[in-house]
Amino acid sequence: MKASLDRIDLKMLRLLQDNGRLTNAELAQSVAVSPATCHRRTQRLFDEGYISHVRAVVMPQKVDRGALVMVGVVLDRSTPESFAEFEKAVAKLKFILDCHLVAGDFDYFLKIRVGDMADFNRIHGDQLIALPGVRQTRTFFVMKEVVDNAPLDF
Amino acid sequence: MKASLDRIDLKMLRLLQDNGRLTNAELAQSVAVSPATCHRRTQRLFDEGYISHVRAVVMPQKVDRGALVMVGVVLDRSTPESFAEFEKAVAKLKFILDCHLVAGDFDYFLKIRVGDMADFNRIHGDQLIALPGVRQTRTFFVMKEVVDNAPLDF
DNA sequence: TGCCTTCATGGAAGATTCTTCCGTTATTGA
DNA sequence: TCAATAACGGAAGAATCTTCCATGAAGGCA
């Protein structure tokens, strides 16, 4: 958005996106500036919000969250209050990775991670269709994760 | 999967997921072990694949990738070769964040980030419908990102 | 029980890195 | 051209990393 990122900043962003554990010294060498300058620039990337946070990516299969499900949701009514209530309730469900208001045949798309299909069926019955204003849901079980959460290309 | 994670390992995973920049010393203090032990445990979490990588999360809006689109794809034929060819081609398109083979009305679901709708329309015409074996696509423009890529709850 | 093996832990210390200050250089605008 | 502003790299004290080693706990077995 802002053109206030020069070639060095962009390279730093890409390197940190690929490896958030890079030390300042390594990063400095990779972009050919001094550690002091690199430190200052990195700090700016955080301070000005170019990097929102740094996250260790936990392998879902290793912590019993190997099942991925996409769910399309249609609400009863298309009122702002109805949307707001739904979104507020969704925010409390920690197994929901994505929740996006979309244009098209659905109102919302959800991306959900659980242990297995049995888990999902229980959650679907207990918590999803119980969300406020839900008229119908359509479930798409993910059979193969071809690409999941790829790094941003910029 | 493996029950080889004790309470300390799990806490470390959660803390590192929330903040991948935690220093070893800080993490050690948070989970009440010595820096040496913490260092050894962290290394194990990486070596054994509990943490696949650490990533700086770049704000899409700041690098002109503010538009998010979900796309459902149906292929011409449901043969293994057809699927393989499609997946191979998808892997080369860097603007695709997610690509999942699903059960249901679609064959694949894509999650795509671009600069704006004009960008997407160009990409849709040039690259998406040109993917091998695509019979039809259905586009869902994201109007509001309620939750995007939430941390894994485990 | 007593002993041995195995394993995880914390202290310690040299090596590395971080973080900040400061003088210098490059860029901008009048 | 010249002054003002911003960005740069060197340097150094503080903090951290990384590894080695000795200690102590847990489990198996006679």
Image (spheres, coloured by chain):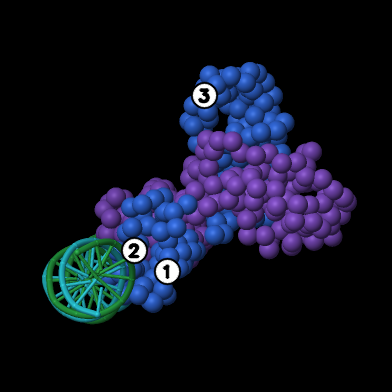
Chain colours: A purple, B blue, C cyan, D green
Question: Which is more N-terminal, label 2 or label 3?
Answer: 2
Contact, mark 2 vs mark 1 (Cβ under 8 Å): yes
In whole angstroms, how far apart are the C-alphas of marks 3 and 2? 39 Å
Mark 3 burial class by Cα count in 10 Å: few <14, some 14-19, many 20+:
few
Please name whichever residue, C23 or B28, is drawn nearer the observer in this view of the structure. Answer: B28
Q: How many marks?
A: 3
Where in the figure is residue A106, as x and y percent of width and height? 78, 42
In whole angstroms, how far apart are the C-alphas of marks 3 and 1? 41 Å
Q: The disc numbered 3 marks a residue on which chain? A: B
At x 31% / y 50%, what residue is drawn?
Answer: A31
Where in the figure is residue A14, as x and y percent of width and height? 42, 48
Amino acid at circle 2: Arg
Quarter assignment of residue B96: top right
Where in the figure is residue A103, as x and y percent of width and height? 76, 42
Which circle marks residue B8 in the picture? Answer: 1
Q: Secondary structure at mark 2?
A: helix
Q: Nearer the viewer, mark 3 or mark 2?
A: 2
Question: Which is more N-terminal, label 1 or label 3?
Answer: 1
At x 42% / y 75%, what residue is drawn?
Answer: B30
Amino acid at circle 1: Ile
Contact, mark 3 vs mark 1 (Cβ under 8 Å): no
Q: Is residue B5 left or right of residue B141?
A: left
As drawn, B66 above or below B88? below
As drawn, D22 above or below B61? below
